[in-house]
């Protein structure tokens, strides 16, 4: 009975939104049905598609590169470990969101024309200083997350059409990705999330099957790990892989019943592991140390119609993921210039355009597909989606009264609050020392090496000499 009461409180205005949706659906026109089917999502399935699709974007192509740095065993173990840790901190974020939303709705706050974001949750629960910290790390991570998608677009299309260098392709895809300003919110990613997941599933199994059929190349070596720098660089790329829940709050807010989010991210992570483990292992088995100089796995596979299909599908998916990463930035910018609650889609779209410009510029300055993932993982993801949520959860429920009145109580199998605090402390210490400390050192050494080798604004990163 108590849990039913909590669920009603948590759902709040979402129940009203569902009723409004039912009224809208009463219009039986074909146009209205199609619009709702493709455009208007908020179910648990939509959330699962969004989490799965967003988590396994272009990084799918760089995980074999990480395996060449880590070695097979460490690569597999780090994927399992960080997959579990990422699911844990996504759970913490969802708990804090529910706590914040419940408190606000008890104060009669209406969120129907307002998208709740992570920095607002921190502000409501812990104050403005935590809000500012969360805003800085979250926005910076999403900014570079969008940059990485643009870099990946240029890196991939080059393997189909090398008549243009990668920098020129970055110009072109920057303009294409700017069209995401017209997608209002995560409600409207229903069909994109579904299609995006199909695309990454195809690409993952193409990498697996093509590598096994191709067999091991002549003289293949599997010497990783060889240096501490490469080892921790590879580890932080995997940290980045399973740290894709910087948009968790926005995805939850797009759900009709956000209290059901608790297990969605874990199920999404399990599915993602069925894609990343076989593909990364197979490609590393087939090509070994050659991956150390080919951060994009597609570069080593022979050109076939299947590879070209994988490239095209990943390009489309990277467009979708660019929108996923950029949409929270659009929201922040809209709130800053006070157009967030306007009903004019065109006005909001035009207001969003300035957000794309720095992303475009940074993708041209740092076109280091692969190494940039590790740098973002160690310096930004470590705090944004691991350390800050764990610390915020501990501080929010530090007092006995806060723990007693918490909307979401810790699971009994974990040992309730004692077990939860021990787990959070472990996450903070591990990620700070291994992820930020060793990982930050290694990834920055590697990143500086890329700058010294290729230079800033390089026209064609890791292209064959005669193609540059």
Image (tube, rainbow, N blue to C red):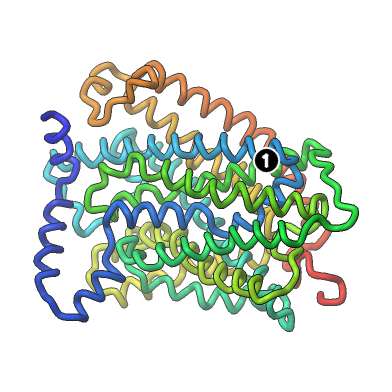
Above or below 163: residue 265: above
Residue pictured at 46% horizontal, 57% vertical: 53
Above or below 148: residue 164: below
**Foreground pick, 297 / 233:** 297
Residue pictured at 65% horizontal, 69% vertical: 156
Name the residue at the right extreme: 219
Q: In the structure shown, which secondary structural element does the residue marked by tag 1 occupy?
A: helix
**Foreground pick, 69 / 364:** 69
Q: What is the crowding at mark 1: few (fewer than 14 residues within 10 Å), some, or many (at least 20)?
A: many
**Place of residue 259 in the rendered image (x, y in percent of width and height, measured from the top left):** 25, 42
Question: Residue 35 appears in which quarter of the rendering?
Answer: bottom left
Above or below 12: residue 386: above
Residue pictured at 51% horizontal, 77% vertical: 176
Residue under pointer 1: 75
**Place of residue 157 in the rendered image (x, y in percent of width and height, measured from the top left):** 65, 74
Number of numbered discs visible in the structure rendering = 1
**Foreground pick, 98 / 361:** 98
**Place of residue 17 in the rendered image (x, y in percent of width and height, measured from the top left):** 15, 57
**Place of residue 84 in the rendered image (x, y in percent of width and height, measured from the top left):** 50, 35
Q: Is residue 253 left or right of residue 92?
A: left
- Quadrant of image for the N terminus: top left
Name the residue at the bottom extreme: 163
Residue pictured at 34% horizontal, 19% vertical: 416
Q: Is residue 459 left or right of residue 191?
A: right
Q: Is residue 217 left or right of residue 280?
A: right
**Foreground pick, 404 / 125:** 404
- Quadrant of image for the C terminus: bottom right
Name the residue at the front extreme: 213
């Amino acid at each position: 009975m108590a849990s039913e009461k909590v669920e009603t409180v948590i759902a709040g205005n979402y129940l009203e939104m569902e009723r409004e949706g039912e009224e809208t659906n009463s219009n039986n026109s074909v146009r209205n049905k199609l619009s709702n089917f493709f455009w208007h999502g908020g179910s648990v399935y939509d959330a699962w598609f969004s989490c799965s699709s967003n988590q396994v974007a272009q990084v799918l192509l760089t995980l074999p590169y990480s395996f060449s740095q880590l070695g097979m065993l460490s690569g597999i173990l780090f994927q399992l470990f960080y997959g579990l840790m990422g699911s844990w901190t996504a759970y913490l974020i969802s708990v804090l969101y529910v706590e914040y939303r419940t408190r606000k709705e008890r104060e009669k706050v209406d969120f129907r024309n307002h998208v709740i974001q992570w920095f607002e949750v921190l502000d409501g629960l812990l104050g403005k200083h935590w809000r500012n910290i969360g805003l800085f790390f979250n926005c910076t991570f999403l900014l570079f997350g969008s940059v990485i998608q643009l870099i990946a677009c240029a890196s991939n299309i080059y393997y189909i059409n090398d008549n243009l260098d990668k920098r020129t392709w970055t110009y072109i895809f920057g303009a294409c990705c700017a069209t995401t300003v017209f997608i209002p919110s995560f409600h409207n990613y229903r069909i994109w999330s579904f299609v995006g997941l199909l695309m990454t599933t195809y690409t993952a199994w193409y990498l697996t099957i093509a590598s096994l059929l191709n067999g091991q190349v002549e003289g293949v070596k599997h010497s990783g790990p060889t240096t501490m720098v490469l080892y921790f660089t590879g580890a932080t790329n995997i940290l980045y892989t399973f740290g894709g829940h910087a948009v968790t709050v926005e995805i939850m807010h797009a759900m009709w019943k956000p209290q059901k989010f608790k297990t969605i991210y874990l199920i999404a992570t399990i599915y993602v592991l069925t894609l990343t483990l076989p593909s990364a292992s197979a490609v590393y088995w087939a090509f070994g140390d050659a991956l150390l100089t080919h951060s994009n796995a597609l570069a080593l596979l022979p050109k076939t119609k299947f590879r070209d299909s994988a490239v095209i599908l990943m390009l489309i998916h990277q467009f979708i993921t660019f929108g996923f990463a950029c949409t929270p930035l659009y929201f922040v910018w809209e709130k800053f210039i006070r157009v967030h609650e306007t009903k004019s889609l065109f006005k909001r779209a035009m207001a969003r355009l300035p957000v794309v410009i720095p992303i475009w510029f940074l993708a041209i300055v740092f076109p280091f597909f692969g190494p940039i993932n590790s740098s973002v993982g160690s310096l930004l993801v470590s705090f944004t989606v691991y350390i800050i949520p764990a610390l915020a959860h501990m501080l929010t429920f530090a007092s006995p009264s806060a723990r007693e009145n918490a909307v979401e109580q810790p699971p009994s199998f974990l040992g309730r609050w004692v077990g939860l605090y021990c787990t959070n402390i472990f996450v903070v210490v591990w990620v700070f020392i291994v992820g930020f400390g060793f990982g930050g050192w290694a990834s920055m050494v590697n990143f500086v090496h890329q700058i010294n080798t290729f230079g800033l604004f390089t026209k064609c990163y890791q292209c064959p000499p005669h193609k540059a």
